[in-house]
Image: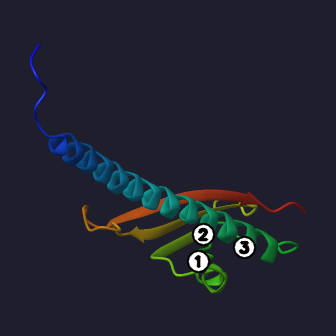
Amino acid sequence: MKADEGSTLPLIIGLSALLISMVLVTAEVQSLVLVKARALSEARLAALYIAKQTEGFAPVRGLDYSEAALPVLGPILSVRVSSSDGKTFDAEVCEKWESPFGLHPAATICDRAKARAIS
């Protein structure tokens, strides 16, 4: 029987590299998911806010309500709130995503939500 000679250093280096890459990928994905969830929540807030503010008024089709929604939203890239039928408000919010470690270029993440005024 031969004696085992060698070092575990290559194994430790390989496992460490694998662990570091997993941490980086997980952080990037979690950051992206967080921005996507925030965009959805801001879109829901904008649609619900405008639906609540216009409750009891005559419907206006095609009016852009974006400026009215800006004061209640956090720092966002863009917002668009409109209504095609005067009762259902469609909001689209876009936010800028930046890679936490600079591994990817910045991207614009958008999401949409709808709310209906009940009256």
85 and 15: which is toward the camera: 15
- The alpha-carbon separation of the residues under discs 1 and 3 comes to 9 Å
Give the amino acid type for the residue marked by disc 2 in the picture.
Val
- The percent coordinates of residue 48 (x first, y second) are 74, 67
Crowd around label 3: few <14 · some 14–19 · many ≥20 (10 Å): many
Reading the chain from its start, which is encountered first: label 3 or label 2?
3
Under circle 3, the secondary element is: helix
- Per the model, the C-alpha gap separating discs 2 and 1 is 5 Å
Q: Position of residue 70 (x, y in %)?
A: 60, 82
Mark 1 Cα-neighbour bin, 10 Å: few <14, some 14–19, many ≥20: some
User: Image check: 78 left or right of 42?
Assistant: left
Q: Which mark is residue 31?
A: none
Amino acid carrying mark 1 in the image: Ser
Q: Is residue 56 visible?
A: yes
15 left or right of 92? Answer: left
Report the residue at 43% width, 62% height from top. 109
Query: At x 14% / y 40%, what residue is drawn?
Result: 7
Residue flagged by tag 3: what amino acid is it?
Ile
* Most distant residue in the top direction: 1
Quarter assignment of residue 114 = bottom right
Indicate which disc residue 81 carries: 2
Do tag 3 and tag 2 residues touch (Cβ < 8 Å)? yes
Residue in front for this viewpoint, 43 or 106: 106
Label 2 with label 1: CB-CB less than 8 Å:
yes
* Rendering coords of residue 28 (x, y %): 37, 58
Image coords of residue 21 (percent x, y): 28, 51
- Say which residue appears at 9% left-offset and 18% top-offset: 2
Q: Which residue position holds label 3? A: 50
Relative to 75, say whether 34 is above or below: above
N-terminal label among 1 and 3: 3
Residue 66: numbered disc:
1
Residue 8 appears left or right of 27:
left
